[in-house]
Amino acid sequence: MFKGVTDLFKKPDPKELVRKWQSSLRAEQRNIERQIRDIQFEEKKVRKSITEAAKRNDMATCRILAKEIIQSRRAVSRLYVNKAQMISIGNALSEQLAMVKVAGTLQRSSDVMKLINESMKLPEMQRTMMDMAREMQKAGLIEEMTSEALDSALGGEDIEEEADEEVDAVLREVAGEVLAALPAAKARPAAVPQQQQQEEAPEEREELAALQERLNAARPSALSPVPVPAAAMGKSKKAAPEEAPAAPPAGKAPAAAKPEAAPKGKGAKPKK
């Protein structure tokens, strides 16, 4: 009985703690690699859709999908940063494990504290790193985080807007040959019958919405999807008909032109 009580309050073995944290970090790295593969797989589908839209000279759809590719690539870059942070924390824990074998206890490390704070700024790692930080605080590896430091670490990242130059660069990369082959004067028809607009517009919006849902599901932190605008429909303006002359009142005939009066005097002799 007393042995069970003492085991309850016994501090965990530092070596076991370090190995547990390293195992969690390796699992997170595998999860990051899987997310990167999923995003890149969905990007291939978006590239194909951009090419098809470029063949139709549908530049509005091309630019929307190009923005999706930009957001996906930013997500992949952020995931690689996450992976690098995991590797750095793992290396710092390996140094702590070597020190445990010599000193028998974990030594407080400012390097691990700094890496943990930087990892908490990444939305995908906040929950995992907060749980790990609590365990490290109990083990004495890092200092207890104050509320100000925690708020600073959990501060969200600013979402960058897609610049027109970035969108144009993606379009040249993905569909540059197709766009170059299109005649310069060719443009999408401005006026389309209303019935055809009602039939085609929902299909295009559904296709774009499905692509955005798959990309958002693959991305670690879902960004707000770019809204799909309806196709711009130009209406041909008809010239106003010319005003007809006013009709005469009913019952009155139009006045006939009066013949010119013959000059007084002798009439002119007929020519022979």
Image (tube, helix red, strand yellow):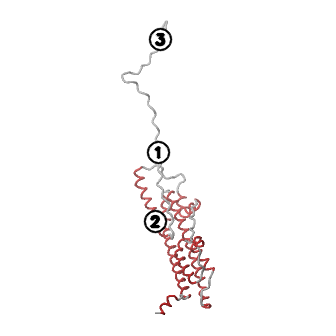
Residue 214 image point, x, y percent = 46, 67
Q: Distance between the residues labelled 2 and 1?
A: 37 Å
Give the class, few, some or many, for how many residues have Cα within 10 Å of label 3's Cα (few <14, many ≥20). Answer: few
Residue 117 image point, x, y percent = 59, 75
Out of 230 and 51, give the one closest to the viewer.
Answer: 230
Residue 82 image point, x, y percent = 56, 74
Q: Mark 2 points at which residue?
A: 213
Looking at the image, tell me whether mark 3 or mark 2 is earlier in sequence order: 2
Query: Type of residue at label 1?
Result: Ser
Q: Mark 1 points at which residue?
A: 236
Element carrying mark 2: helix
Most extreme residue toward the right is 110
Q: Which residue is drawn at 49% across and 88% down?
A: 8
Looking at the image, tell me whether mark 2 or mark 1 is earlier in sequence order: 2
Residue 73 image point, x, y percent = 55, 68
Looking at the image, tell me whether mark 3 or mark 1 is earlier in sequence order: 1
* Quadrant in which residue 207 is drawn: bottom left
Q: Distance between the residues labelled 3 and 1?
A: 58 Å
Q: In this view, does 107 lie above or below 218?
A: below
Quick check: marks 3 and 1 in contact, CB under 8 Å? no
Q: In this view, does 65 lie above or below 249?
A: below
- For the residues carrying marks 3 and 2, which lies nearer the camera in this image? 2
Query: Type of residue at label 2?
Result: Glu
Q: Name the residue under label 3.
A: 262
